Image (tube, rainbow, N blue to C red):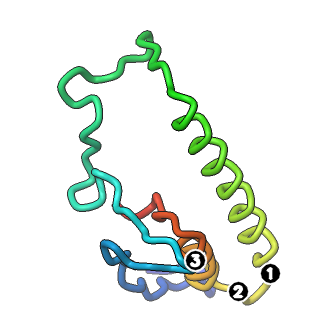
Amino acid sequence: PYAGSVRPGKQSPQRVVIPGESSSSKTIVLPDYALDGRPKKGSSSPLLPWVIEVKTPEEIEKMRASGKLAREVLDLAGRAVAPGVTTDEIDTLVHEAIVNAGAYPSPLN
C-alpha cells in the first residue's frame, strides 16, 4: 500500500487555550469563533468584498501588533526547520510562543 519508506505519522491531540488563561501578565481572551469556528462579527450583515469596513485607531493598532507578532512567530518557525525536527515540534513551539505573547493561536478552530 505504501511506496518507499514514507509511513503515516501519529497525529497529536489538538492544543487548547483555556479561557482567561494568563501568560506573562496578559490574559488571553478567546475570539468569538473559538468554540464553534464561526465568526460572529458581521454575522447580521456579512462583509462582502466590496464593503469597506472603516477601522478605528484602536483597531488599526491591534492589527499592527498582530501583524508584528505574526512575523516574529513565522521567523521563529522558519528557524526551527531542520532535518529531524517534526512539524509537531514546530507546531508546539509556535503555539507556545503565541500563548506566551498573550495571543490566541488562530489555527485553533
Give the vertical position of 37 relative to 24 (above or below).
above
The quadrant holding residue 77 is bottom right
Q: Amino acid at mark 2?
A: Val
Report if the CB atoms under discs 2 and 1 are less than 8 Å apart: yes
- Asked whether 35 or 84 is in front, the reply is 35
Label pair 2/3, CB-CB below 8 angstroms: no
Q: Position of residue 1 (x, y in %)?
A: 43, 80
Q: Which residue is mark 1?
A: 82
- The answer to which quarter of the image holds residue 47 is top left
What's the residue at 66%, 43% (across, down)? 64
Q: Amino acid at mark 3?
A: Asn
Among numbered discs 2 and 3, the one appearing first in the sequence: 2
First in residue order: circle 3 vs circle 1? 1
Q: CA distance from mark 3 to mark 1?
A: 23 Å
Outermost left residue: 44
Amino acid found under the numbered disc labelled 1: Ala
Q: Percent position (x, y) of residue 33?
A: 29, 52
Residue furthest top in the image? 50
Circle 3 residues within 10 Å: few <14, some 14–19, many ≥20: some
The image quarter in which residue 6 lies: bottom right
Residue identified by numbered label 2 = 85
